[in-house]
Image (cartoon, rainbow, N blue to C red):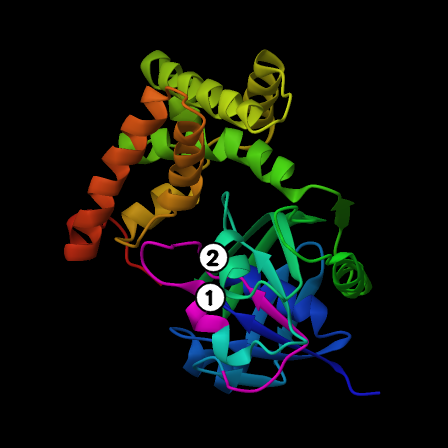
Amino acid sequence: MAPVRVLTVGTGAIGAIYSWRLSKNCHVTTVCRSNYDAVRENGLQIDSKKFGVETFKPNEVVKAVPEEPFDYVLVTLKALPDVYDVAEIIAPAVSKKTTIVLIQNGLGVEEPIVERFPDNPIVSIVAYIGTSQTAPGQIKMVGDESLVVGNYKPSPIDSDTQIDAFVDLLRKGGCTVNRVNDVEQVRWQKLFWNGAFSPVCTVARMNTTEILANPEAMGTVKKLMCELIESANAMGYSFDVEEQMETMLERTRATAMDYKPSMLLDLERGQPMEISVILGTPLRRAKAKGMSVPNLEMMHDLLMAIQSSIKKSPGRFRTVNSD
């Protein structure tokens, strides 16, 4: 039997880890950009508390998406729809038999994929993992990892068979996977934290410990979180506002002190931020329901203004060298 063929598009830290785990049972091709030379010559040097230390050499390392068929196209690019079109990028590798897998932040990342490839199965995944690329091809993973994999209900086709098969491949690679029926519910819950703490940390240029100690900053965090939870409920969910807010704050105190969200790190590196999928999508959906979400709208607009400046002059906000 021919091996399962996986193409990873976006071989940064998360793409590296899950390509490595899938390679235990699959033929893996990785698309690399800034780290292409390092990975091509030396492989990916991975140091993981959970999985161990290993040099992972993908079966193939390429600079661009090849025009050949794959069983799975795994997208681990940052979700930046205002910067590039993921559907356009992966198109050369998508055939009628390809399942598209998304491990990306935010809400609505599936929408452009389903619009472009309505007949292809889609596997939507929310990742909880602490990992970074400390130098080209050098990956450090701290602590545990877990994935929540589920159905994207607006998809016009049933992807259950493909979801279950991909979950099996991940589990065979040692990954912790939780299978759910509705992945959007999980994306909303992750957004309650990410859509509140990330923008406030970024605009204030403060880490989570500094935010928690600042009454004005925390007031804004709570207003954003409340609007996000109420927006989710307008979509048909029934989250308890006070319960969710307290859970998010307790989790921050317990596991995310002195933490800089990726949005803030992107700003410090002069790189585009994931504003559209973290703030833009919930804002658009709330407005479509006739809701007033003034804090969400103001934070979105402020950060999009900063984003515009980053695109024109990346060095303007940079405080650290990018990888």
Question: Residue drawn 25% across and 53% down?
Answer: 270
Query: In the image shown, does 140 or 168 lie closer to the viewer?
Result: 168
- Badge 1 marks a residue whose secondary structure is helix
Predominant secondary structure, magenta span: loop
Could you say where residue 88 lies in the image, as x and y percent from the top left? 42, 70
Quarter holding the N terminus is bottom right
| Residue hosting label 1 | 87
Whether the magenta-drawn stretch holds residue 250 is answered as no
Mark 1 → mark 2, Cα distance in angstroms: 7 Å
Question: Residue drawn 38% across and 73% down?
Answer: 34
Could you say where residue 50 lies in the image, as x and y percent from the top left? 71, 55
The reply to whether residue 313 is visible in this rendering is no
| Residue hosting label 2 | 112
Residue 100: name its quadrant: bottom right
- Badge 2 marks a residue whose secondary structure is helix
Determine whether label 1 and label 2 are within 8 Å by CB.
Answer: yes
- For badge 1, the amino acid type reads Ala
Quarter holding the C terminus is bottom left
Could you say where residue 239 lies in the image, as x and y percent from the top left? 63, 21
Instruction: Give the crowd class for mark 2: few <14, some 14-19, many >=20 residues within 10 Å.
Output: some
Give the mark nearest the N terminus, 1 or 2.
1
Q: Which residues are magenta?
A: 66-90
